[in-house]
Image (tube, helix red, strand yellow):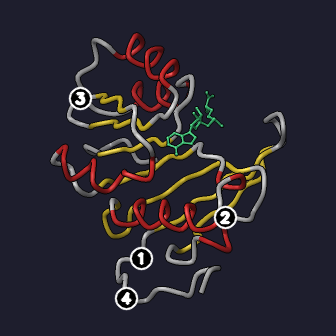
Amino acid sequence: MDFSRPLVIVELGPGEGCHSRHIARQMCSNSRLILFELDKDFCRHLRRQFHNDPRVTILNVDAMRMAEELERLGNPRCDYVISGIPFLVIEANTKMRMLESIRQGMAPGASFITYQISLELKEYARQFHLNHREYCLFNIPPINILEFLKPIDSSRVAPTAST
Ligand SMILES: C[S@@+](CC[C@H](N)C(=O)[O-])C[C@H]1O[C@@H](n2cnc3c(N)ncnc32)[C@H](O)[C@@H]1O
């Protein structure tokens, strides 16, 4: 991630906050980090960690609502989406709706980075361009890191797994 400029960063499913802390440490004072976490206890834990950091917003909201929440917050298009959502266990239609909300909330050329135990998401995320893929053996279990880009020209969209 390029932290040299002001950014709007969304994290979906931050859980305990290990990535959020790392991002907040690096981003500049006029960047914004918006966290979407379903679990109330994790939200409470995140609020404790970031209570004195005005750059960070914690939402106890489903990632499915990413695009509408960004509109509501006045930052309708983000530069990065970092996601820990376990897409593999999400039903296909829900997964497609979530991916569409993510796409809508991203600026053209923005980056959607996710860690997944399988590569299944590639088949569903055809509205994005797969820019980078890495296999991290040092995670337990080992994990795939995928970086998708929102095309600059969104009219050039490939068919998705459900079509
Ligand atoms: C794999 S864990 C993330 C772990 C995190 N990296 C950590 O170290 O704590 C996935 C997280 O996604 C959250 N989650 C799952 N589905 C979600 C959804 N639809 N919207 C928001 N958060 C969700 C879960 O509550 C969980 O905290």
Helix or strand or loop: what does disc 3 sit on? Answer: loop
User: What separation in Å lies between label 2 and label 1 (alpha carbons)?
Assistant: 17 Å
Where is mark 4, residue-wise? Answer: 155
Q: Quadrant of residue 55?
A: top left
Helix or strand or loop: what does disc 1 sit on? Answer: loop
Q: Does label 2 or label 4 sit earlier along the sequence?
A: 2
Instruction: Name the kind of residue labelled 4 in the image.
Output: Ser
Q: Is residue 140 above or below residue 87?
A: above
- Where residue 46 sits: x, y (%)? 44, 19
Circle 3 or circle 1, nearest the eye: 1
Disc 3 crowd rating (10 Å Cα; few below 14, some 14-19, many 20+) is: few
Where is mark 3, residue-wise? Answer: 29
User: What separation in Å lies between label 3 and label 2 (alpha carbons)?
Assistant: 33 Å
Where is mark 1, residue-wise? Answer: 151
Disc 2 residue: CB within 8 Å of ligand 1: no
- Where residue 134 sits: x, y (%)? 72, 55
- Where residue 45 sits: x, y (%)? 48, 14
Where is mark 2, residue-wise? Answer: 121
Residue at 53 percent across and 38 percent down: it is 13
Disc 4 crowd rating (10 Å Cα; few below 14, some 14-19, many 20+) is: few
Residues tagged 4 and 3 counted as in contact (Cβ below 8 A)? no
Q: Is residue 114 left or right of residue 33?
A: right
